[in-house]
Image (cartoon, rainbow, N blue to C red):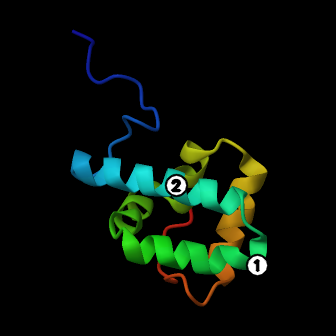
Amino acid sequence: GGGGRAPATPETDAIDLPLNVQKAARSAVRDLVRKLRNSPAEAWSELIAAAISAEGSIWHFVQSVSVRKAILEANPDAAFADRVVEAMRVSPLVPADLNYG
């Protein structure tokens, strides 16, 4: 018989993290995106570094799904996501080993 798992969505993609870690990370990414949208781009690097330092689950979450997908899940504006990814790539305050997708 057919069956199997439901179609993959951002919520159901196979993420190798405990649900509570995913939930904490998603919440922290949403908070970060809200702060970034209300801040000048010059402040982003510091805000991103502070968010990753304050909530370690963000690092694990973006390694699993990619920075871009995590940002898009919190805010489906692709141009905004691209600007955030670029700001993270060039920032000396953000870990260089992130999965940017």
Question: Where, quadrant-wise, is the C terminus in this rendering?
Answer: bottom right
Measure how far apart labels 1 and 2 are at the Cα level: 18 Å
| Residue 36 image-quadrant placement | bottom right
- Residue 29, given in percent of the width and then of the height, sits at 49, 56
Q: From the viewer's side, name the closer residue of 13 and 70.
A: 70
Local secondary structure at mark 1: helix
Question: Where, quadrant-wise, is the N terminus in this rendering?
Answer: top left
Side (left or right) of 93 relative to 51: right
| Residue 77 image-quadrant placement | top right
Where 48 falls versus 78 (above or below)? below
Lower sequence index among marks 1 and 2: 2
* Amino acid bearing label 2: Asp
Side (left or right) of 13 relative to 96: left
Q: From the viewer's side, name the closer residue of 40 and 99.
A: 40
Question: What residue is at 60 percent from the left and 90 percent from the top?
Answer: 92
Name the outermost residue toward the top: 1
Question: Do we see residue 8 in this rendering?
Answer: yes
Side (left or right) of 13 relative to 66: left
Question: What residue is at 42 percent from the left and 50 percent from the top?
Answer: 27
Question: Do we see residue 98 in this rendering?
Answer: no
Question: What residue is at 76 percent from the left and 71 percent from the top?
Answer: 41
Label 1: how many Cα within 10 Å (few below 14, some 14–19, many 20+):
few
| Residue 43 image-quadrant placement | bottom right
Side (left or right) of 57 relative to 10: left
Where 36 falls versus 49 (above or below)? above
- Residue 64, given in percent of the width and then of the height, sits at 38, 58
Instruction: Quickly name the residue at label 1.
Output: 42
Tag 1 and tag 2, C-beta contact below 8 Å: no
Label 2: how many Cα within 10 Å (few below 14, some 14–19, many 20+):
few
Local secondary structure at mark 2: helix
Question: What residue is at 41 percent from the left and 77 percent from the top?
Answer: 53
Determine which of the numbered discs, if any, sits on residue 31 in the image.
2
